[in-house]
Image (cartoon, rainbow, N blue to C red):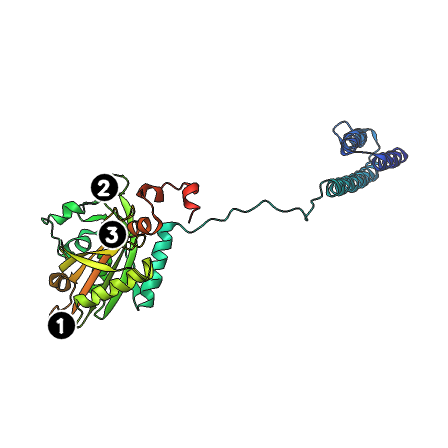
């Protein structure tokens, strides 16, 4: 029996080393180690041996099984190594070939304007203030001298979550929050997204972006406001840009004005961009209403201030000659790649 087992061992090792594929190795494994394999049959026939022979035969069979499994593993590794080398040889990559061209994006026109405006006002000593887009009605309206029965609430109707919580319709609530927590001097701008329940058309959108500014200090006058806006207009739209004020009404400023800038395309002569008027409406502004200062805990007898606000999309449309606001939100790469 011992001689038969050793012969099986030599025969199995010889076949393994002469095999040409992993399929051959699998066939050899089944032949010797499978359920009906040679070594398995020997173990099943152990009952015919004398009791004193069984331990030695069993030990030898296990030793031979381990040797065959080791040889199978070594040969399998040889096949895998050979397969890897063949792949490396046949599937090599020519690293000198040029790669696929990477298409670079550009900064969105709205983001461009916001970043440009930030740089201009930072250069004038302003700070950037931020606040929540989901706002309380008291900050969006009440503290800004727009109580619940005020008609201006209809003009700025927005999206309500509850009676007291809404999506802000302007970035002015940021100003109220800053005035509540900080005593003058205050010099901030507040960029961000705002929401109003407008129908979508070439000049309106239910979501758009604003930049509002606020200065509160002693002896602030309308002259400071005009000088600030003139500086901004020249930096943003060109050094030859002029500005004019037209009387207007806002509940949170008194006096209030609409500010127009001379058309930076035609220089005031009249063209398609300014619709032949020579002027482009830019923003609303005015002196902070005393009641707003009182609502935010600031003494209007000691401090005055001015505020202004404009739509970023309006600046972008004017600066880049865009005639339809919807183009800014459609994500058409053919349009955006121009910027």
Residue drawn at x 63%, y 47% is 98
The residues bearing labels 2 and 3 have C-alpha atoms spaced at a distance of: 28 Å
* Front-most of residues 91 and 48: 91
**1 left or right of 187 in image:** right
Residue drawn at x 17%, y 65% is 222
What residue does disc 2 label? 198
Tell me the mark number nearer the camera, choosing from 2 and 3: 3
Q: Secondary structure at mark 1?
A: loop
Residue drawn at x 25%, y 56% is 261
Image coordinates for residue 174, horizontal then vertical, percent: 24, 58
Image coordinates for residue 277, horizontal then vertical, percent: 23, 49
Q: Residues within 10 Å of mark 1 (few under 14, many from 20)?
A: few
- Please report whichever mark, 1 or 2, sits nearer to the chain's N-terminal start: 2
Image coordinates for residue 130, horizontal then vertical, percent: 29, 58
Image coordinates for residue 197, horizontal then vertical, percent: 22, 42
* Front-most of residues 38 and 42: 38
Q: Residues within 10 Å of mark 3 (few under 14, many from 20)?
A: many
- Establish if 51 lies above or below 272: above
Q: Quadrant of the N terminus?
A: top right
Q: Secondary structure at mark 2?
A: loop
The reply to whether residue 309 is in sight is yes
What residue does disc 1 label? 302
- Please report whichever mark, 2 or 3, sits nearer to the chain's N-terminal start: 2
**184 left or right of 11 in image:** left
**304 left or right of 193 in image:** left
The reply to whether residue 129 is in sight is no
Quadrant of residue 223 within the rendered picture: bottom left
* Front-most of residues 327 and 271: 271
What residue does disc 3 label? 278
The residues bearing labels 1 and 2 have C-alpha atoms spaced at a distance of: 39 Å
């Amino acid at each position: 029996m011992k001689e038969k087992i050793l012969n099986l061992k030599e025969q199995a090792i010889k076949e393994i080393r002469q095999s040409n594929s992993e399929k051959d190795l699998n066939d050899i494994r089944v032949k010797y180690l499978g359920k009906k394999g040679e070594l398995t049959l020997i173990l099943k026939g152990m009952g015919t041996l004398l009791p004193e022979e069984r331990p030695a035969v069993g030990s030898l069979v296990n030793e031979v099984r381990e040797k065959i499994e080791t040889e199978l593993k070594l040969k399998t590794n040889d096949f895998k190594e050979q397969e890897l080398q063949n792949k490396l040889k046949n599937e090599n990559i020519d690293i000198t070939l040029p790669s696929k061209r990477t298409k670079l994006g550009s900064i969105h026109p709205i983001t461009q304007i916001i970043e440009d405006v930030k740089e201009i006002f930072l250069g004038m000593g302003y700070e950037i203030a931020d606040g929540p887009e989901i706002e309380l009605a008291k900050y969006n309206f009440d503290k800004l001298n727009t109580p619940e029965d005020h008609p201006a609430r209809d003009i700025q109707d927005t999206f309500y979550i509850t009676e007291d919580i809404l999506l802000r319709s302007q970035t002015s609530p940021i100003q109220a929050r800053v005035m509540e927590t900080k005593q003058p001097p205050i010099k901030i701008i507040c960029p961000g997204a705002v929401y109003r329940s407008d129908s979508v058309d070439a000049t309106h959108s239910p979501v758009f972006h604003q930049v509002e500014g606020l200065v509160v200090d002693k002896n602030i006058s309308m002259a400071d406001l005009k000088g600030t806006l003139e500086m901004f207009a020249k930096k943003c739209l060109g050094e030859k840009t002029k500005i004019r004020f037209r009387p207007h009404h806002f509940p949170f400023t008194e006096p209030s004005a609409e500010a127009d800038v001379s058309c930076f395309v035609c220089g005031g002569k009249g063209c398609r961009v300014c619709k032949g008027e020579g002027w482009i409406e830019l923003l609303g502004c005015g002196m902070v209403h005393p009641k707003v200062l009182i609502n935010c805990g600031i003494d209007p007898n000691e401090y005055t201030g001015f505020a202004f606000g404009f739509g970023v999309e309006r600046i972008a449309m004017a600066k880049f000659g865009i005639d339809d606001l919807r183009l800014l939100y459609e994500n058409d790469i053919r349009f955006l790649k121009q910027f």
